[in-house]
Image: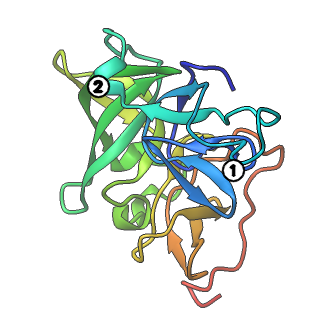
Amino acid sequence: MGTREIVTPGERLGSLDSVLSGPGTYVENGHVYASVVGFFDEIRGGNEGGEGEGEEAPPLPLVCVRGPRKEGEDMVPKVGDFVLCQVDRVQQQHQRVDVSILSVGSRALRESFRATIRLQDVREFDVQTLSLPDCFRAGDLVRARILTTGDSKSFFVTTSSVDLGVVFAKSVNGFPLNPVSWDCMECSGTGRREFRKVAKPPDTERPLSVMPHPLRGT
């Protein structure tokens, strides 16, 4: 992974035997992960490694993630762009989800833009049966596509494609959630499952399965 590459929370950056955990990262099961959206940086000459070993073991590099608002690029999203958003508020009564656009493609933004996911733009089927709180929760990171523009800082976005939807979320217990099906994620700490409109991971060849869901009792 090269420096200045955009990364998202939960993305693995390296193992503890080869890198040190810096700002914007966290350690879990011997690996270092991004904890924020931003630019990946690898700083050589960390303050650990080789202690008591003379000069045989060079210092490990320090990996960190710099926030997009400080180091982002000055740009405005346009129709058709793929964007990374953070959910601000879910409004079932008004059939909308309010989000903030954090990055466009691989470019983090200096300033976030407001956007809305309407009920009809969440998925392509059974829209009338959708419950928005079963698709998104405040704080979720969502991959979406710009549908239309409102004013200069407001957009409508869609998650209807299989590769669009939630890419990172935390459970009600505060642990990262892992995708197990197109509408379900599993808590990495407790094993409990929660509903989400899940984006197909980019490195997954097969679509996420539609599996019996313990939340539904099926």
Category of crowding for the residue at label 2, using alpha-carbon neighbours closer than 10 angstroms: few (below 14), some (14–19), many (at least 20): some
Residue 146 position by quadrant: top left
Q: Under tag 1, what secondary structure?
A: loop
The tag on residue 16 is 1
Residue shown at 42%/70% (left/top)?
174
Q: Secondary structure at mark 2?
A: helix
Q: Which residue is more in the foreground, 36 or 55?
A: 55
Kindly tell me whether residue 75 is visible in this rendering: yes
The local crowd at label 1, few if under 14, some if 14 to 19, many if 20 or more residues have their Cα within 10 Å, is: some
Which quadrant, please, contains the C terminus?
bottom right
Task: Give the vertical position of 133 relative to 45 (above or below).
Answer: below
Identified by mark 1, the residue type is Leu
Q: Nearer the viewer, residue 93 or 109?
A: 109
Q: Earlier in the sequence, mark 2 or mark 1?
A: 1
Which corner quadrant holds the N terminus?
Answer: top right
Q: Amino acid at mark 2?
A: Arg
Residue 179 is situated, as x and y percent measured from the top left of the image, at 63, 61
Can you tell which mark lies on residue 29? none
User: Going by the image, does 202 lie left or right of 27?
Assistant: right
Disc on res. 69: 2
